[in-house]
Image (tube, helix red, strand yellow):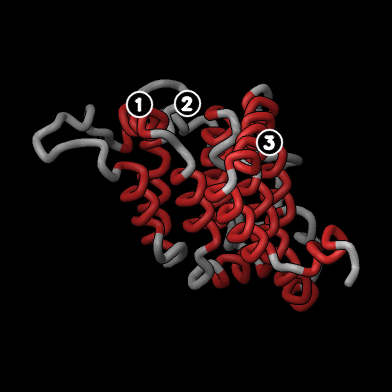
């Protein structure tokens, strides 16, 4: 039989995970090696903060600008490619925001997924945007990705997000806004689950859950001005005014 190290790549990731976890639980030396590897990766990940804003700008341009001069049938041909790019972008962001990542990286990832969600809601004036929006009437990639990032957060990270309703970077009111947009445009069918996961177990029934937020207090108006006022005749600016 070939050397076992040459055969391990033939196993699927789930099997490797199970075997390694079992070995680590039964053998202290393997447990020490695995722990050291995890700690090393955590130190490396915690030392850097990732910013994902370029992804939200890229998605906005792909949906609203790149193919805006094409005719309707050609836009239709491109729409599924754009949709797949959006799904791949969501997946890329989520994979960078796991439990070993810097807390700020997780916040940034959740924030940019929110921007991508708002772009999808408000970008239906042409064929590409309309077709992308239709696909997210059933696709739950955005909600699942957000819940995965939130699941990697500590209780304190989640509490800070929920309690901040008025600072310049307050995320909670923007998520509440996106839930309303999702309902209005019939997209992201499981978005309410995002808010539930974010607040789960943070408060007792009689706890003060922070100041109530209203639309008039939304501090994100300037950032989202461009998304919210999409022209009908494809007179797009070069970039969204985030």
> The residue tagged with tag 3: helix, strand or loop?
helix
Using residue 186 as the reference point, say whether residue 34 is left or right of it: right
Q: CA distance from mark 2 to mark 1?
A: 9 Å
Q: Bin the neighbour count of mark 1 within 10 Å (Cα to Cα): few under 14, some 14-19, many 20 and up.
A: some
- On the image, numbered disc 3 is attached to which residue? 37
Specify which label sits upstream in the sequence, 3 or 2.
3
Q: Nearer the viewer, residue 169 or 28?
A: 28
Secondary structure found at label 1? loop
Which residue is label 2 attached to? 169
Q: Who comes first in sequence, dot 3 or dot 1?
A: 3
- Which image quadrant: the C terminus? top right
Number of the front mark, 3 or 2: 3
Viewed as shown, does residue 56 lie left or right of 174?
right
Q: Residue at x 88, y 62 (%)?
A: 3
Up the image or down, 60 lies above or below 76; here it is: above
Label 3 to label 2, Cα distance in Å?
34 Å
Residue 90 image position (x, y, % from top left) = 62, 53
Q: Residue at x 22, y 27 (%)?
A: 211
Which numbered dot is residue 164?
Answer: 1
């Amino acid at each position: 039989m070939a050397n076992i190290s040459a055969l391990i790549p033939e196993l699927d990731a789930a099997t490797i995970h199970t075997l390694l976890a079992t070995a680590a639980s039964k053998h202290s030396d393997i447990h020490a090696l695995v722990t050291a590897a995890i700690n090393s990766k955590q130190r490396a990940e915690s030392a850097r903060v990732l910013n994902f804003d370029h992804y939200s700008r890229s998605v906005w341009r792909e949906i609203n600008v790149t193919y805006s001069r094409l005719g309707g049938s050609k836009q239709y041909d491109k729409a599924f490619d754009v949709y797949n790019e959006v799904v791949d972008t969501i997946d890329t962001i989520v994979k960078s925001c796991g439990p070993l990542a810097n807390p700020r990286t997780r916040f940034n990832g959740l924030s940019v997924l929110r921007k991508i969600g708002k772009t999808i809601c408000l970008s239906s004036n042409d064929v590409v945007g309309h077709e992308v929006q239709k696909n997210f009437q059933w696709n739950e990639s955005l909600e699942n990705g957000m819940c995965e990032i939130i699941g990697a957060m500590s209780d304190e990270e989640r509490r800070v997000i929920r309690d901040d309703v008025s600072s310049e970077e307050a995320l909670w009111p923007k998520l509440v806004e996106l839930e309303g947009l999702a309902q209005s445009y019939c997209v992201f069918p499981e978005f309410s689950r995002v808010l539930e996961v974010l607040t789960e177990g943070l408060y007792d029934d009689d706890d003060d859950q922070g100041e109530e937020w209203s639309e008039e207090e939304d501090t994100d108006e300037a950032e989202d001005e461009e998304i919210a006022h999409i022209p009908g005749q494809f007179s797009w600016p070069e970039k969204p005014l985030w």
